Amino acid sequence: MAVELRYMAMCQEATNPRKGAPVKQPSTPRIELYREAVRDSGAPGGGRPVVERCELVPPAGVDPLSLKLSLLPSFHEEKPTTTLGAYFEAQSKGIDFPRSLDGYNSHDEAERRTFTTLLEAAPPRSHVIVAWRDERHWYVDELFYRLEGVDGGSRGEWTEVVEGSLADFIRFSPLIQSQSAHPADDVVLELSKSPGMPNTRHFNLEVFADGRFEVRRPREHDSRGSDVHRLTTLLIAASRLPAERGPSFPRPFAHDAQTRSVTYVVAGRRIRVTLDADTPPDILSFANRMAAAYDVEL
C-alpha cells in the first residue's frame, strides 16, 4: 500500500493549555523528547505503559536553528544537508518534505518495515524527538530527516502526556501520523447528548484528526481548543474497542427522553453506538472517559 504525503496539512494550531498540550512556544525553538515509562497500576500483571515528555536543551552555545538535518536515504532524493531553521522557513511556505514519496513507495512493504523512518512500522524505538518553532509548525525527527547535534544537551523535568506505549504514540499521535487516512478536518471522535424535556442540557462534541475539538452547547457557552496528546490517548483507547457494531434493537418509546451516542474509528471503520442499558461496558467506559477529557456531562 502506497503512503500519501499529508504532512503540511496537519501542521495546525495546538493552543490548549491543559496538561499534555504543547505549550505556547517562544521565539527560540523548543525541542521535546518523548519516551516510554511504566506506572504501577496496582493490579496483577504488572504496570501500565505511559509516554512522558521533557524539554531537550542543546549544549551551551548551540543555536537550535543551526542544527543540521539530513534527509533519510529511504526517500531516494538527492538533497543537501539543511538546518532546522531552513526546514521551518520552508515549512511556513508550504513546501513539502520530501517533494514526493515515490522513491519511498518504490520499495515493497516488507522492505519498508526495516527502514528507520517513523512513516510506517519500524524497529522498536527508545524515544521520539519533536521540535517546535511555534504553535503551528513542528519537526518530527526520523520522519523525513535526521537531526544532528543535540547529543550532550540537558533535559528538563519529565511529564506524563499520553496513556499508552511509545509504539502506540507513534501509531496514533497526530504529530507523527500526518500521513494518516484522515485529513486534518476529519472528525475522528464524536460524543453527543440530544435535547429532551425543556431546559435539559445537551451538547455535541467533535474532535478532529489534528487534535482540535469543538463543543456546542445550545443556550450555553460553546468551547474550542486543541490538544494532540489528549486525542492520542483516546485514539489508543478506541483502537481496543470492537470494530463491529453489535446487534441493533428497537429502543423503547420514551417521551422527551435524551439520546446519548459516541462515535469512534477502529481499523479505518467509523463506528457509532447509541448508549443505553445494553451498551457493552468497555464502550460505555470509553464514552465516560471521553466526556471527562473534554469536560462535558454525559
Image (tube, grey):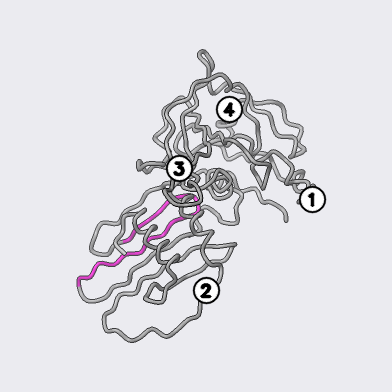
Which residue occupies the foreground of this view, 294 or 222? 294
Marks 3,2: beta carbons within 8 A? no
Q: Which stretch did the figure color magenta?
A: 199-216
> In the rendered view of the protein, which quadrant contains the C terminus?
bottom left
Considering the numbered disc 3 on the image, is that residue within a helix, a strand or a loop? strand
Query: What is the secondary structure assignment of the residue under circle 4?
Result: helix
Circle number at residue 84: 4
Disc 1 versus disc 3: distance between alpha carbons? 38 Å
Residue 23, image quadrant: top left
* Of the image marks 1 and 3, the number of the one nearer the N terminus: 3
| Residue pointed to by mark 3 | 39
Question: Of the residues under marks 4 and 1, which one precedes in the sequence?
Answer: 4
Q: Nearer the viewer, mark 3 or mark 4?
A: 3
Going from the N terminus, do you reach mark 4 or mark 2 first?
Answer: 4
Q: To which residue does mark 1 refer?
A: 108
The reply to whether discs 4 and 1 touch (Cβ–Cβ < 8 Å) is no
* Label 3 – label 4 distance at C-alpha: 34 Å
